[in-house]
Image (cartoon, rainbow, N blue to C red):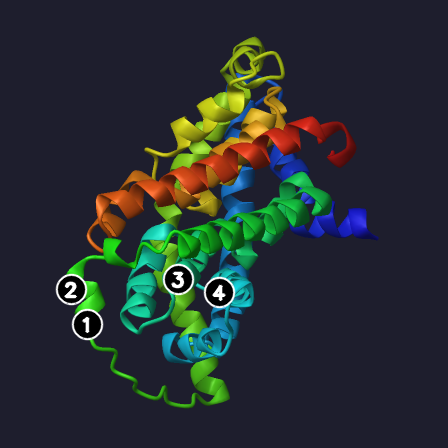
Amino acid sequence: MGKFITDQILGMKWLNTLIGNLLGTLGLDATSRIGGSIQFFLYDVIKITVLLCVLIYLISYIQSYFPPERSKKIMGRFHGIWANCIAALLGTVTPFCSCSSIPLFIGFTSAGLPLGVTFSFLISSPMVDLGSLVLLMSIFGAKVAILYVVLGLVIAVAGGTLIEKLHMENQVEEFIRRASAVDIASPTLTQMERLVYAKDQVAETFKKVFPYILIGVGIGAVIHNWIPESWVVAVLGSHNPFGVILATIIGIPMYADIFGTIPIAEALLGKGAQLGTVLAFMMGVTTLSLPSMIMLRKAVKPKLLGVFIAICALGIIVVGYLFNLFQGFIL
């Protein structure tokens, strides 16, 4: 039953077969490079788009119960590592990319929440949202998806805790520290208003994310059908001990979210790249993208930004090597 859900409902394998048959009736061989590229592109775009819209709707409905003011109050009730855990968990029901998470991070910091707690939220939000769990299940299976989310939360909690221990509050820009928090109670939404909010979030997020889906799937189609397997194995396979580090560094300058990086990861894994190397690439893109680091620099000083990047990069690299080490038991 679990395999059926993963393959046919989340993975939509039936859709891939259907597209292959349709291409065959049009005279295109799905086993050829051109036919295979078209099949990969159509299948992944349709599958990810459907999952994207359903997930955003469900997550946005849940998120309607956790506006910034309520999230701040929830996190304010906890202290120590428990506060970091709650912040990391709240990050799973908030925006899908790091650039969207940073304004919330600034708001929480201005409201006086501990710096380490807000950084646990900032790490978790783009890396391990609920959407990533379902999408990863659709491609890599439940075991990989759950481990990815658990280890992502561990990075978020550990990173935030370490930043808290370093006492770097003076590394937050002055205008953030001096901002006075305006504590306005959020209006109570009716059931219909929550449904409308979720629908609006689907439309808004889809407009922002869909171009990156097309780009990501396009790159994945090229890797899947045109890049020789020997190239991928040589660079990101088990014979290159620096593959995880290389994948993390390559991912950082890019800007995408989990929906845009998964097709690339799927194609790389299919070509012989190691699982941990692929996941390190995904984490690097979603957590440490260059545009989000530029935005974050406006809120924190270079020293704190450097510590944040170093902690995240080190955590991602460690997770990547762990997945590679136990790949035989996971897949």
Q: Identity of the amino acid at label 3?
A: Thr
Q: Earlier in the sequence, mark 4 or mark 2?
A: 4
How many numbered marks, from 0 up? 4
Mark 1 secondary-structure assignment: loop
Q: Position of residue 172 (x, y in %)?
A: 24, 57
Residue bearing mark 1: 179
| The furthest residue to the right | 1
Depth order, front residue of 186/170: 170
Task: Tell me whether circle 2 and circle 1 mark residues in contact (CB < 8 Å).
Answer: yes
Residue bearing mark 3: 118
* Residue drawn at x 58%, y 48% as measured from the top left: 135
Q: CA gap, disc 3 to disc 4?
A: 7 Å
Q: Identity of the amino acid at label 4?
A: Ala
Mark 3 secondary-structure assignment: helix
> What is the crowding at mark 3: few (fewer than 14 residues within 10 Å), some, or many (at least 20)?
many
Residue bearing mark 4: 87
Mark 2 secondary-structure assignment: helix
| The furthest residue to the left | 175
Q: Position of residue 94 (x, y in %)?
A: 44, 64
Task: Tell me whether circle 4 and circle 2 mark residues in contact (CB < 8 Å).
Answer: no
Q: Is residue 312 above or below residue 329?
A: below
